[in-house]
Amino acid sequence: MTQEISCESAEKESYTLSILIPVFNEEAGLEELHNRVSFVIEDLGCSTKIITEIIYVNDGSRDGSKGVIDRLRAQDSRITLVNLSRNFGKEVALTAGLDKAVGDAVIILDADLQDPPELIPEFIRLWRDEGYDNVYGQRTRRDGETWVKRLTAFGFYRVMRRLGDVDMPTDTGDFRLLSRRAVDALCELREQHRFMKGLFAWIGFPSIGVPYVRDPRHVGGSKWNYLKLFGLAVEGITSHSFLPLRVAGLMGLCTAMAAFCYGAFIAVRTILFGDPVAGYPSMMTVVLFLGGIQLLSLGIIGEYVGRTYNETKKRSLYFVSEYSPSALAKFGAKSGAKTRTETAGLEKRRPG
């Protein structure tokens, strides 16, 4: 499964690395993904003494993804399987993987191979040699995507940069390296409505971008349709900005002022020129306009109220139906490494 790379023996400084890969219906591309990741890891071993785990978080896949991960794990002791009890969504799957990661740094990588694993050595160099806690990939081009997807993504990142309460870098995704202290900080954030790209920026710490060209998907199609992307955009805006509420209030204020001015105008005109009957079409236009403003404002308020309601329930973010740790994770557990399993929910370990 893995490719052999010959290295000269030398004294090397050691560190541990967790590579986190959320998986949802990616059966066809997992073996190629694992081969490329393994090659990069083994190549890294020529220059540094690295102990690695690869965490696959199966987020309720309905295809044979878990079976492929089980086969890979039988051949590679570096693999950790976190099998969630159902599909909780990518943001929660990332959280589950971060909770289980024991490495000195964590690489987050999508399973579709649009983000090249070959950038991992550069991420590690910037972390170890230059001290950055958050090294993220910044897309200079998005191959294999429609112009509509590219245009909406371009607009979303720039809108979020203006509306959000943090300076979120543009044209970035989840592909990044996080230091141990950055991971620990993220694991302290247990909010239900999670927009991870915003949380990555919210925790602060020194950050730097690495430009790259995003490749087309290796196999299959995107699991994100435009409706899901719109929901993610709403999640991001409402999680990191109160501006929509302020806009709703401003619209109400402007509408009230316009109504007051128009009422004063009608009163003056009636006194001076009499009171002709207003037209039915103009009356309906005003009523429908005001009704639309009210419903829009109620919808915006409802988004925030609904999120507040969900937070008050204090439900677990996810539940794990099966957890099969790697050799590194087992060692970390024995040595007392921080894994935050207490916040992960109910677990059922594999027999034997």
Image (cartoon, rainbow, N blue to C red):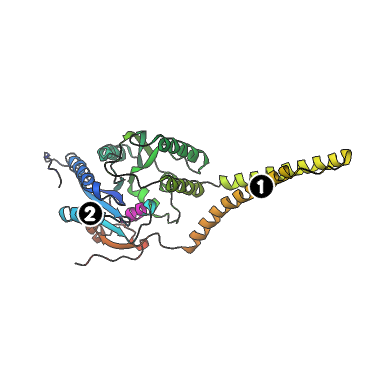
Residue 173 in the image: state x and y as whole percent.
Answer: 37, 42
Residue 262 in the image: state x and y as whole percent.
Answer: 76, 41
Count of residue discs: 2
Mark 1 → mark 2, Cα distance in angstroms: 56 Å
Comparing 51 with 169, the one in front is: 169
Q: Magenta segment range?
A: 93-102
Main SS type for the magenta part? helix
Decide whether residue 90 is among the magenta residues: no
Residue shown at 38% from the left, 36% from the top = 146
Residue shown at 27% from the left, 39% from the top = 116
- Is 255 positioned to the left or the right of 89 in the image? right
Comparing 31 with 79, the one in front is: 31
Q: In this picture, is 123 found above or below 83?
A: above
Mark drawn on residue 288: 1
Q: Residues within 10 Å of mark 1 (few under 14, many from 20)?
A: few
Q: Quick one: SS at disc 2? A: helix
Mark drawn on residue 69: 2
The type of residue carrying mark 2 is Ile
Residue shown at 23% from the left, 45% from the top = 33
Q: Quadrant of residue 122?
A: top left
Toward the front, the furthest residue is: 280
Q: Residues within 10 Å of mark 2 (few under 14, many from 20)?
A: many
Comparing 317 with 122, the one in front is: 317
- Is 255 positioned to the left or the right of 229 in the image? right
Q: Is residue 193 visible?
A: yes
Q: Quick one: SS at disc 1? A: helix
First in sequence: mark 1 or mark 2? 2
Decide whether residue 100 is among the magenta residues: yes
